[in-house]
Amino acid sequence: MSIEYKLNYPISAQQFIRLLKQTTLGERRPTDNMETIQGMIDNSNLMVTAWIEDELIGIARSVTDFHYCCYLSDLAVSENVQTSGVGKQLIIETFKQLKEGCKLNLLSAPQAVDYYPHIGLEKHNSAWILSDLNQLK
């Protein structure tokens, strides 16, 4: 199995949705909202994808300034190829695009909390999420 990694290669919303549905991440992404999925693709400024021939099997979708912070928003690898190193390689290829000193940040899906320390990422205990402006007091 030959896997090819591509930098900022265009993908369609349908390809992204198909991949998300092959992962547990798909449960937490709006795969039934084409406008949001397209916006997620269009407004990412760093995407590394993994391919077997013409099939999208993995993605690392990030928003970054390339110098200080990179938020890896989606790391998805098809369950058909998980445990083959694709996720780790997607992180490596993403990190290679960043300037020295830039930190990569991500929020883990519940099913992946044990994966990230296994490959060497450090846990950070002070992440905060605002989902609705009405939450602010």
Image: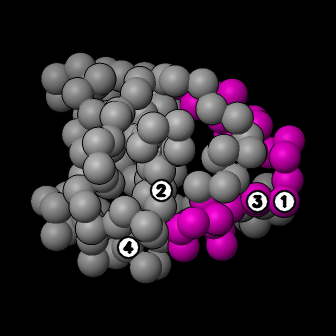
List the residue tagged with mark 3: 30
Distance CA(mark 1)–CA(mark 4): 23 Å
Q: Is residue 23 magenta?
A: yes
* Earlier sequence position, callout 2 versus callout 4: 2
The residue located at (53%, 37%) in the rendering is 54
Q: Is residue 40 above or below residue 82?
A: above
Q: Nearer the viewer, mark 3 or mark 2?
A: 2
Tag 3: residue type? Pro
Distance CA(mark 2)–CA(mark 1): 17 Å
List the residue tagged with mark 4: 112
Q: Nearer the viewer, mark 2 or mark 4?
A: 2
Please identify the quadrant where the C terminus is shown: bottom right
**Helix, strand or loop at disc 3?**
loop
- Numbered range of the magenta stretch: 20-45
Residue 112 picture location, percent across and down = 38, 73
Tag 4: residue type? Ala
Q: Is residue 115 above or below residue 43?
A: below
